[in-house]
Image (tube, helix red, strand yellow):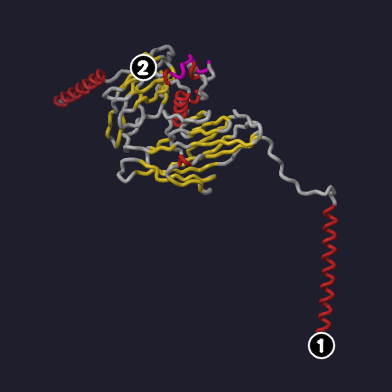
């Protein structure tokens, strides 16, 4: 019994010592059960990824932090609920009340924010933080609010993580606490498996027919993924010629426009994995007055494969069809940039279909039909008489 007590005491001491060591070495975080919108916060970045149970630290590179909105005292004082937008993001057409509804929606909102920053040249509003050799970085002296995290420079051999949002303080609803110094783990993908990648730069051309058509009418065109694969267009803006504009760049769709006749490019789209990529091109009917819109749809399939040395991705074949997958083949080859998606709009009233010829009398068809009927009856009587005469001649012989 005495020996058991000694062993038990030693075990208890060892456990207590372990707890003390952990308490001294573990990072401390500012958890609180009270919400304070004026409190100073921080964010720690922990860069790593796991492959089949093996953890890899990602050292080097940098991230950029953008403050999108501040926080209110409560959620009932502002149209965006809990958030008060920063002035530069007043034009962002996103309902911030949707933040946190679902992971899928948060990804879409984050991408929309990143594209808004890129398209409006707001990169200077961000603060850059370097990642050290251990894969750590820290942003300090931050005010409470909604932030967007974007990777500025990915380390050599790695793919940039998708932009994501974080809120300071982080609210742990399950435990009813607030974390004013959270650690975030960007979802960095594995090392780039290939040395070279392949890209396309699709473009669209608008033509207008009709007299006195306005020269500045905006026409919009959509290049949309049909298989839910992300369009890698971030940090690679769509470009346009002859006075067009990039209207939208989202995770699955790019929209560009021309003003009157012109040509617009959807931007450089890079494929990072082998496989089939399927898209649809359409003109968006924006209801411009006086125009008849072109309803043509294009179905596009790009097949990406490894080269013989298995070191680079190449475009094996591109197929463009009219309408859908069962439509007429318009292009097939390895240089899809030579095919331009064409659209033609007509300005002015569309002429009505030609009417049937009229004589001015609404009853003339009755006369014609009566005459035809009499003619048929006469012919029938004549045939009947010849038939009876022939029968009589046969019987008399």
Q: Which mark is residue 397?
A: 1
Q: Nearer the viewer, mark 2 or mark 1?
A: 1
Q: Position of residue 241 (x, y in %)?
A: 50, 31
Q: Is residue 135 above or below residue 326?
A: above
Q: Quick check: can you spot residue 176?
A: no
- Magenta residues span 67-77
Kindly indicate the quadrant of the structure image that contains residue 216.
top right
Q: Nearer the viewer, residue 107 or 346?
A: 346
Kindly indicate the quadrant of the structure image that contains residue 230.
top left
Residue that extends furthest to the bottom in the rendered view of this protein = 397
Q: Nearer the viewer, residue 275 or 288?
A: 288
Q: Quadrant of the N terminus?
A: top left
Q: Quick check: can you spot residue 138?
A: yes
Q: Quadrant of the C terminus?
A: bottom right
Report how far apart the C-alphas of labels 2 and 1 lie in the structure: 125 Å
How dense is the environment of label 2, judged by Cα within 10 Å: few (below 14), some, or many (20 and up)? many
Disc 2, SS: strand
Residue sitting at 85 percent across and 63 percent down? 374
Residue sitting at 54 percent across and 33 percent down? 262
Q: Position of residue 349 (x, y in %)?
A: 69, 36
Q: Position of residue 218 (x, y in %)?
A: 58, 30
Q: Position of residue 223 (x, y in %)?
A: 50, 36
**Disc 2 marks which residue?**
42
Q: Nearer the viewer, residue 166 or 328?
A: 328
Residue 69 belongs to magenta span: yes
How dense is the environment of label 1, judged by Cα within 10 Å: few (below 14), some, or many (20 and up)? few
């Amino acid at each position: 019994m005495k020996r058991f007590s000694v062993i038990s005491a030693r075990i208890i001491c060892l456990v207590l010592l372990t707890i003390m060591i952990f308490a001294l070495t573990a990072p401390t975080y500012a958890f609180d059960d009270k919400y304070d919108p004026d409190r100073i916060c921080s964010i720690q970045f922990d860069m790593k990824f796991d492959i089949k149970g093996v953890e890899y630290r990602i050292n080097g590179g940098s991230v950029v932090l953008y403050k999108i909105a501040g926080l209110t005292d409560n959620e009932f004082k502002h149209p965006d609920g809990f958030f008060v937008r920063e002035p530069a993001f007043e034009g962002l057409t996103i309902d911030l009340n949707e933040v946190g509804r679902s992971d899928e929606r948060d990804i879409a909102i984050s991408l929309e924010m990143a594209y808004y920053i890129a398209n409006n040249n707001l990169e200077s509003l961000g603060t850059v933080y370097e990642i050290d050799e251990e894969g750590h970085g820290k942003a300090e002296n931050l005010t409470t609010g909604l932030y967007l995290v974007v990777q500025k420079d990915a380390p050599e051999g790695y793919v940039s993580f998708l932009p994501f949002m974080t809120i300071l303080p982080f609210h742990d609803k399950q435990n009813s606490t607030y974390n004013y110094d959270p650690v975030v783990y960007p979802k960095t993908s594995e090392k780039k498996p290939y040395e070279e990648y392949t890209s396309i730069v699709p473009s669209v051309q608008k033509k207008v027919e009709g007299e006195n058509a306005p020269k500045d009418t905006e026409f919009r065109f959509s290049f949309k993924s049909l298989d839910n694969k992300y369009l890698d267009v971030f940090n690679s803006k769509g470009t346009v010629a002859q006075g067009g504009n990039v209207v939208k760049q989202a995770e699955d769709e790019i929209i560009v426009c021309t003003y009157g006749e012109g040509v617009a490019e959807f931007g450089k789209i890079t494929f990072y994995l082998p496989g089939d990529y399927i898209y649809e091109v359409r003109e968006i009917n924006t209801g411009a007055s006086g125009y008849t819109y072109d309803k043509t749809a294009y179905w596009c399939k790009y097949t990406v494969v490894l080269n013989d040395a298995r070191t680079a991705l190449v475009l094996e074949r591109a197929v463009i069809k009219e309408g859908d997958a069962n439509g007429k083949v318009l292009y097939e080859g390895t240089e899809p940039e030579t095919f331009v998606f064409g659209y033609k709009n007509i300005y002015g009233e569309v002429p009505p279909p030609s009417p049937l010829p009229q004589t001015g009398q609404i009853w003339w068809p009755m006369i014609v039909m009566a005459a035809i009927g009499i003619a048929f009856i006469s012919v029938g009587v004549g045939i009947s008489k010849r038939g009876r005469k022939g029968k009589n001649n046969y019987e008399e012989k």
